[in-house]
């Protein structure tokens, strides 16, 4: 649902303000790796092989359309984590989406071929409150949601890629979840998203980004999670780090790929 805003002066007409619309994430899944194929993006600009001098020495993957260089080191960790209590992670994420604990609202500007040139922009905003859930167990389209009053990130440039496909690069957002007694804070950085409008109110998206190893360790270590998992996490995540997002020569981030469903909403600021 798009809102066109027009401002008119006393004499000369003012160009239309860029159209914008909002959609809330209604489902979120971690990208899986199947025989070297994974959804996601080339986040570091190199197609690396295991042990080489690029990509932190981690082998990259191929996306379902055959594009090489895809970064999704977290996907390789999923079988390991799912052998622990983290196996409940995805169902918990869906519960948190439905009760408003995870309320991620995308703001899209220029997602329309008729939008003025230069309008394309994208950001992820934190929502506030408990959303309405339909009989299918997913958030309802068309509802009005509040934005969290805290500081919001600035939009990043975005562009259409053919009909009903929207791409944005180099943005960030926070993913905060609760795993049993542990509050996990995952700041996703250097992200890329490819968002597809499936119908007027429904979107699908692939999102790739990186989270700092230290951030997840700070969230988890010393909490009530399984002791064996606490002992293993520093080594597991440290060995998986495959991104040097700040360019300091140290691989401090683990790439992750997310598959997302979203529905159109109105926002009340």
Image (cartoon, helix red, strand yellow):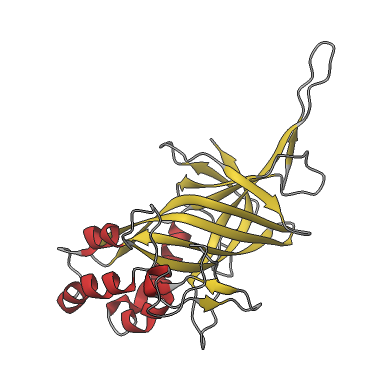
**156 in relation to 239, above or below:** above
Residue 122, position in %: x, y? 59, 47
Q: Residue at x 50, y 50 (%)?
A: 171
Camera-side residue of 105 and 258: 258
Q: Is residue 121 above or below residue 214?
A: above
Tell which of 87 and 152 is nearer to you: 152
Check the image and name the residue furthest to the top.
Answer: 10
In which quadrant of the rendered view does residue 204 lie?
bottom right
Query: Where residue 181 sits: x, y (%)?
Result: 23, 64
Query: In the image, 208: left or right of 239?
Result: right
Q: Residue at x 29, y 74 (%)?
A: 239
Residue 206 image point, x, y percent: 58, 66
Tell me the quarter of the picture where residue 157 sits: top right
Q: Position of residue 133 (x, y in %)?
A: 54, 60
- Residue under the image location 64 percent in, 60 percent down: 195
Give the left or right position of residue 212, taking residue 106 as reference. Answer: left
Q: Is residue 226 toward the left or the right of residue 22 in the image?
A: left
In front here: 209 or 140?
209
- Spot the residue most to the front: 53
Q: How many numbered marks appear?
A: 0
Residue 254 or residue 15, whichever sits in front: 254
Image quadrant in which you'd find residue 247: bottom left
């Amino acid at each position: 649902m798009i809102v066109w805003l027009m401002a008119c002066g006393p004499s000369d007409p003012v160009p239309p303000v860029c159209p914008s619309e909002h959609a809330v994430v209604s489902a979120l899944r971690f990208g899986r790796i199947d025989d070297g194929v994974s959804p996601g993006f080339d986040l570091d600009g190199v197609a690396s092989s295991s042990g080489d001098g690029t990509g932190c020495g981690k082998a990259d993957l191929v996306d379902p359309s055959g594009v090489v260089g895809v970064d999704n080191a977290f996907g390789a960790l999923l079988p390991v984590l799912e052998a622990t209590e983290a196996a409940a992670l995805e169902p918990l994420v869906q519960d948190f989406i439905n009760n408003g604990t995870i309320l991620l609202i995308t703001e899209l500007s220029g997602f329309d071929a008729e939008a003025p040139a230069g309008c394309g922009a994208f950001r992820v905003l934190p929502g506030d409150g408990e959303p309405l859930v339909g009989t299918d167990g997913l958030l309802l389209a068309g509802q009005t949601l509040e934005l969290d009053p805290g500081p919001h990130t600035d939009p990043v440039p975005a562009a259409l890629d053919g009909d009903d496909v929207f791409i944005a690069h180099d943005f960030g957002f926070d993913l905060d979840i609760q795993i049993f007694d542990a509050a996990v804070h995952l700041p996703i950085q250097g992200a890329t998203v490819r968002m597809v409008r499936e119908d007027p109110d429904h979107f699908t998206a692939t999102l790739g980004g990186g989270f700092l190893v230290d951030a997840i360790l700070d969230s988890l270590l010393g909490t009530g999670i399984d002791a064996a998992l606490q002992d293993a996490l520093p080594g597991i995540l440290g060995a998986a780090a495959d991104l040097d997002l700040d360019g300091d020569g140290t691989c401090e981030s683990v790439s992750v790929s997310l598959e997302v469903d979203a529905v159109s909403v109105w926002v009340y600021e």
